[in-house]
Image (cartoon, grey):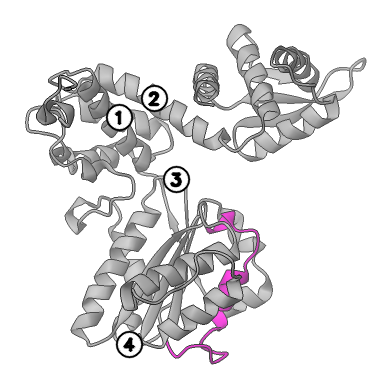
Amino acid sequence: MTDGFSDTDLFSTGDIFARRELLRVGHVPERDRIVGRDNEMRKVGAALGPATQGGPPRNLIIFGKTGTGKSLVSRHICRRARKHSRENSVDLRHVYVDCSDADTETRVAREMVLQVRDELAPSMEIPAQGIGASEYYRYLWMLLDEIDVFVVILDEIDKLDDDDILMQLSRAEESGKTDAYIGVISISNKIEYREQLNERVNSSLQDRELTFHPYDADQLEEILQNRRDAFLQGVLQEDVIPKTAALAAREHGDARKAVDILFEAGSLAEERTDSNVTTQHVDDAQQRTEVKRFQDLVSGSTPHVKYILRALALLTHDNNNVQFSTSEIHQLYERLAEQEGSEPLSHDRVYRLLKEQSFLGITESYHTGGGASKGAYLQHRLMKDPEIVIEALDSGMEEQ
């Protein structure tokens, strides 16, 4: 029995993309595709320069908003340092760990050692679970004795609960655990991260700080033009890249978002079997990427947090005022929770959960004076488009 599809039809990739990997967020491009980061590359290169000669690398803490090229530049320069070190008969290795996924010391230690193991001793058996950080370190120090220099990129390091991993890495050589020189490039979206480190770690790291500023519209356009060959020739209409760059520039110069939107625009054209990517695809893609980002942001939240956010989004959508008191939100939240068959949380609990959302950047909360009769109270404002929030929450419910 046949399903009516030939393999060619069933696995067709469409007539839009030529090299879609160029638009993947984790893709590290060649040097000529990196825009507006010459000074930053020189500074990261200077930190790793001694390591390419067999000496100790300098540690770095890199700050900047999402999509400013921090991870891309760090990974690119590490790859070039590794290649250059081989010319000097130096064995330099590096690993990249995303701390938003590996968010505990044990997970980071496991990720580091498994990446090193896969390069140096693929046949070595290291448990993927069931052992603690100290055991993973033991394996790591043993493997590092085979190389000269080890560089660790810890992306979104502010997601870790403590700085124990930094203490272990910065003191490893001094305490005789390994003869390899170790360098750490810590990447954070939060400029205040440095203030969270204890004095011993600060002293051990002896780091240098580097800040990546947002891209402007011209730089974003150049970044996207440098990835135009992700598409088949003639597919992109001329105004697609300028519009995508302008949208991303409006959102704090986020290159990652610009690349996301361009990829989604192409994907929409592919899904609709259109022959060209147009600005309409860009508009629709922006909506889709915003919904996906918000879904990721609240994916681990409890149902009650989602009811609270839905209540605030509905209030924002249906009313002229943009901020609402905890009591106003709580009243609508109660109705939504009851409609879902859930026992509503107390006013005080909703108040605390709203403050948590403010910390995450989903809402903004501030005290205001209500006049002599009302006194001061907390008001909340949704920092996202209410239609995006409602669509994201609706889509999330459908997937459950």
Q: CA distance from mark 1 to mark 2?
A: 8 Å
Q: Residues within 10 Å of mark 4 (few under 14, many from 20)?
A: some
Identify the amino acid type marked 3: Thr
Which-is-in-front pick, marks 3 and 1? 1
Identify the amino acid type marked 1: Glu
**Residue 396: x percent and y percent?**
52, 25
Disc 1 on helix, strand or loop? helix
Q: Residues within 10 Å of mark 2 (few under 14, many from 20)?
A: some
Question: In the picture provided, is 116 more to the left or to the right than 305?
Answer: left
Q: CA distance from mark 3 to mark 2?
A: 19 Å
Is residue 173 depicted above or below 39 in this figure? below
Identify the amino acid type marked 4: Gly
Q: Which residue is mark 1?
A: 264
Residue 40 shows up from this direction: no
**Residue 251: x percent and y percent?**
43, 33
Q: Which residue is mark 3?
A: 66
Q: Quadrant of residue 362?
A: top right
Which-is-in-front pick, marks 2 and 4? 2
Q: Is residue 342 magenta?
A: no
C-beta proximity under 8 Å, tags 1 and 2: yes
Q: CA distance from mark 4 to mark 3?
A: 33 Å
Q: Earlier in the sequence, mark 2 or mark 4?
A: 4
Q: Which residue is mark 4?
A: 54
Residue lying at 39% horizontally and 68% vertically, measured from the top left: 115
Q: Quadrant of residue 120?
A: bottom left
